[in-house]
Image (cartoon, rainbow, N blue to C red):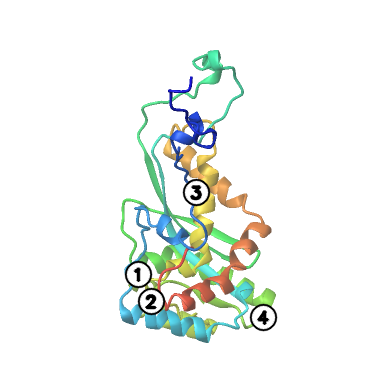
């Protein structure tokens, strides 16, 4: 009709032109801002407290012992094993509906935990003696000399010296009962060489990781311990199952330990 207005064809309304739709998208953080995404709250690692003089001793140790042959070090330490009646993770193959079948469950028992203390040592690929300590009496210098050093540690050290030569050296932490006055005569008679070990430094010793390996092997069992004697046998078997490859694996981490300690200014490291 001639009297009715007409809309220009170029401005005709189209549904998609009326509203601009914006869909929010999320992109993962890239390398430039990844650091802020890592700052989540996490459980603090438990490490020995290190004061400035401890860190200085650790830095000096890393410098002075950089070129040492760590295969010739007799590593030694005490350890406490505890059984609380729990067993390791057990996996089974089952259907969803078989979740509570007796053959697909892991039985639990009300048992009393057992604690046993040991002293042990090793040198390169050579596993040393594992000595059980009386848990009812605290270790002191007299007990250490009579039960550990004279009958076990010193003979093992002398065998290693006979096997590898005079460069074999002992490693101990700085517990006071390791160095009584009466030991000086034994050290002089055997020409015993002692590594100058820094205080508060269990993370520099591979024997700590060896104890963790033994504990893992004890946990990987399918039954609980019915007595303390059974627990002792399990610890001894786990210790005796450590072959030369396992021992050398931890000894060969020493260069990396020294590097990380020096890089961290003498502070704690991941081991």
In the rendered structure, which disc, 4 or 2, sits on the residue that comes first in sequence?
Answer: 4
Tell me the number on the disc at residue 125: none
**Which circle, 4 or 3, is nearer the viewer?**
3
Indicate the secondary structure of the residue bearing disc 2.
Answer: loop
52 relative position to 210: left or right: left
In the rendered structure, which disc, 3 or 2, sits on the residue that comes first in sequence?
Answer: 3
User: In the depicted view, which residue is nearer to us: 118 or 91?
Assistant: 91
Q: Residue at x 35, y 34 (%)?
A: 112
Image marks 1 and 3: residues in contact by CB distance under 8 Å: no
Separation of marks 4 and 3 at Cα, in angstroms: 62 Å
Tell me the number on the disc at residue 27: 3
- Relative to 26, residue 109 above or below: above
Image marks 1 and 2: residues in contact by CB distance under 8 Å: yes
Residue 129 is situated, as x and y percent measured from the top left of the image, at 55, 59
Separation of marks 1 and 4 at Cα, in angstroms: 29 Å
Give the residue number, with chain letter if any, for mark 1. 141
Indicate the secondary structure of the residue bearing disc 3.
Answer: loop
* Residue 59 in view: yes
Residue 203 is situated, as x and y percent measured from the top left of the image, at 45, 66
**Which circle, 3 or 2, is nearer the viewer?**
3
In the rendered structure, which disc, 4 or 3, sits on the residue that comes first in sequence?
Answer: 3
166 relative position to 45: left or right: right
* Residue 87 in view: no
- Relative to 50, residue 7 above or below: above
Give the residue number, with chain letter if any, for mark 4. 165
Image marks 3 and 2: residues in contact by CB distance under 8 Å: no
Separation of marks 1 and 3 at Cα, in angstroms: 63 Å
Residue 115 lies in what quarter of the image? top left
Image marks 4 and 2: residues in contact by CB distance under 8 Å: no
- Relative to 124, residue 137 above or below: above
Give the residue number, with chain letter if any, for mark 2. 179
Residue 46 is situated, as x and y percent measured from the top left of the image, at 36, 59
């Amino acid at each position: 009709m001639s009297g009715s207005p007409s809309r220009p064809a170029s401005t005709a309304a189209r549904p998609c032109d009326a509203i601009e739709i914006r869909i929010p998208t999320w992109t993962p953080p890239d390398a430039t801002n990844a650091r802020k995404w890592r700052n989540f709250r996490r459980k603090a690692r438990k490490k020995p407290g290190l004061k400035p003089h401890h860190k200085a001793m650790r830095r000096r140790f890393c410098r002075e012992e950089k070129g040492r042959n760590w295969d010739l070090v007799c590593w030694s330490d005490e350890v406490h094993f505890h059984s609380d009646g729990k067993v390791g993770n057990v996996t089974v193959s089952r259907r969803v509906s078989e979740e509570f079948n007796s053959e697909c469950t892991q039985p639990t028992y009300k048992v009393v935990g057992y604690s046993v203390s040991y002293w042990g040592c090793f040198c390169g690929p050579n596993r040393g003696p594992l000595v059980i300590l009386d848990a009812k009496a605290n270790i002191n210098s007299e007990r250490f000399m009579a039960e550990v050093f004279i009958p076990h540690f010193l003979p093992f050290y002398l065998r290693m010296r006979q096997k590898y030569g005079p460069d074999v050296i002992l490693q101990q932490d700085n517990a006071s009962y390791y160095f009584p006055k009466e030991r000086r005569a034994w050290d002089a008679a055997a020409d015993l060489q002692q590594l100058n070990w820094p205080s508060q430094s269990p993370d520099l010793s591979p024997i700590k990781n060896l104890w963790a390996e033994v504990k893992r092997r004890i946990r990987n069992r399918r039954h609980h311990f019915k007595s303390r004697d059974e627990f002792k046998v399990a610890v001894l078997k786990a210790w005796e199952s450590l072959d030369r490859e396992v021992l050398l694996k931890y000894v060969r981490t020493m260069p990396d330990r020294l590097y990380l300690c020096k890089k961290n200014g003498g502070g704690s490291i991941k081991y």
